[in-house]
Amino acid sequence: MTDSDDMLRIAVLISGNGTNLQAMIDAIDDGRLHARIVEVISSRPDAYGLKRAAKAHIPTCSLNRDVYADAEVADEVLATELRHSGADYVAMAGYMRMLGPGVLGTFPDRIINLHPALLPSFKGAHAIADAFAAGVKVTGVTVHFANAEYDKGPIIAQRAVPVREDDTVDSLETRIHAVEHILYPEVLEHFAQGDVTIDEQRKVTVRNA
Ligand code: GAR
């Protein structure tokens, strides 16, 4: 894939800082990820990730509380925006909202989520703190397909992060983020290369992983 028009087109959903969005932008810039980010959509107008996108000249869109007040409206607005973006795939990067049937139905097996724990352990919005509080010795990062069940879609890739004796939640979080910033662009590159397949049993295979 040499012509940028042939590249995988990704829309990225964020809610906050956007360090994983930045990791994708950096990976594209230095040739590790052969994809184009066609739009960044935020569930919060004040998300810092929107500034990162603007700096990289990526079109942005932010939805606000009013939109999310009605789940059906939010689903329809997001599905329409994503359809218009021309994205092949949707990558969630710290997007802290549920996806509705309109979005999921528009991109079947084409929505990817990043989660800061080894699913199926520690689902939800506080995965790092929950894993730390549980005293596990190993946690990690999961990339999976999003479906109607929160944090339960087919797993694409996982990487372990050991919990150290002297860790705090903050130090653990820093190491988990560092692993995310490597793993997520790597997984997206596998999508760009057509290496990812999902079978009838919903089991995912990644060639050349
Ligand atoms: C990341 O750690 C991501 O795994 C997590 O939010 C953070 C976003 O960071 N996502 C979830 O917890 C989803 N349940 P970022 O905005 O700096 O990329």
Image: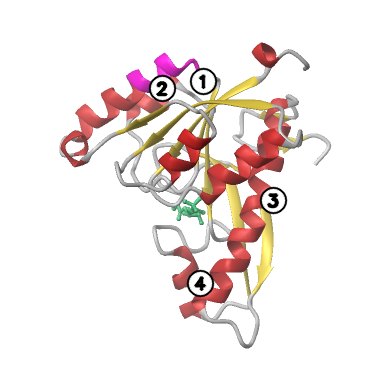
The alpha-carbon separation of the residues under discs 1 and 2 comes to 7 Å
Query: What predominant SS class does the magenta segment belong to?
Result: helix
The alpha-carbon separation of the residues under discs 4 and 1 comes to 34 Å
Q: Which residue is mark 4?
A: 131
Earlier-in-chain disc, 1 versus 3: 1
User: CB under 8 Å between callouts 1 and 2?
Assistant: yes
**Which element type, helix, strand or loop, lies under badge 1?**
loop
In the image, which disc is placed on residue 87? 1
Earlier-in-chain disc, 1 versus 2: 2
Badge 3 amino acid: Ile
Q: Which residue is mark 3?
A: 182
The foreground one among 23 and 150 is: 23
Query: Is 20 rendered above or below residue 110?
Result: below
> Considering the image in quadrants, where does the N terminus appear?
top right
The foreground one among 47 and 206 is: 47
The alpha-carbon separation of the residues under discs 4 and 3 comes to 21 Å
Foreground: disc 4 or disc 1: 1
Q: Which residue is mark 2?
A: 82
The foreground one among 27 and 70 is: 27
The alpha-carbon separation of the residues under discs 1 and 3 comes to 22 Å
- Give residue 130's quadrant in the image: bottom left
Residue at (43%, 41%) from the top-left corner?
51
Residue 110 appears in the figure: yes
Badge 2 amino acid: Leu
Residue at (60%, 57%) from the top-left corner?
141
Badge 1 amino acid: Ala
Residue 6 on image: x %, y %:
68, 13
- Tell me where the magenta segment starts and ends, as one range: 80-87
